[in-house]
Image (cartoon, helix red, strand yellow):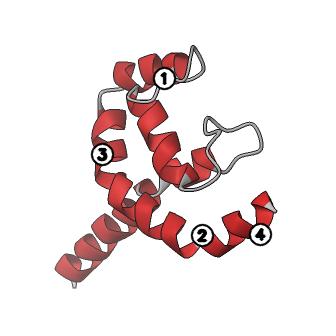
Amino acid sequence: MKGILRIGCVIGLALLLVGCGTFIGRLNDGLSDAEYYRGVDGGLHLLGVRGGGSDGMPAAIICYMMIVCPVITVVSLPVDAAVDTVLLPVDYINTL
């Protein structure tokens, strides 16, 4: 019983940590200026890959100061891409 509870807690924690780029990219004043795949773009801003001027760099510096943030962001990029793919019709309607 302890093993099942431990595995459930680890899976629940992992599900809470992935997809953070989607939330960051879809905020009203989020990091992403992209019309499509905002979550992936937000994750790339957190990693400092997509600077876009000075907008992404403070977030990248803060992310790299917390040692776990880059690892979680890289791990959650596939989840962000999958969620953004599901939300493509919503993004298309919002750009009209």
Residue pushed farthest front? 96
Decide if residue 21 is on the left or right side of residue 69: right
Q: Where is residue 17 in the image (x, y as percent from the top left)?
A: 42, 54
Q: Is residue 10 above or below residue 69?
A: below
Asked where in the image residue 70 lies, by quadrant, the reply is top left
Of the image marks 2 and 4, the number of the one nearer the N terminus: 2
Identified at 45% across, 59% down, the residue is 80
- Residue on which the image places disc 1: 51
Asked where in the image residue 66 lies, by quadrant, the reply is top left
- Residue on which the image places disc 3: 74
Give the CA distance from mark 1 to mark 2: 23 Å
Q: Position of residue 55 (x, y in %)?
A: 60, 20
Q: Is residue 18 above or below residue 8?
A: above
Q: Residue 93 — which label?
A: 4
Give the CA distance from mark 3 to mark 4: 29 Å
Of the image marks 3 and 1, the number of the one nearer the N terminus: 1
- Residue on which the image places disc 2: 88
Disc 1 secondary structure class: loop
Of the image marks 4 and 1, the number of the one nearer the N terminus: 1
Disc 2 secondary structure class: helix
Disc 3 secondary structure class: helix
The amino acid type found where label 4 is placed reads: Ile
Disc 4 secondary structure class: helix
The amino acid type found where label 1 is placed reads: Gly
Say few, some or many: other residues with alpha carbon within 10 Å of mark 4 (under 14 / 14 to 19 / 20 or more): few
Q: Please identify the quadrant where the C terminus is shown.
A: bottom right
The amino acid type found where label 2 is placed reads: Leu
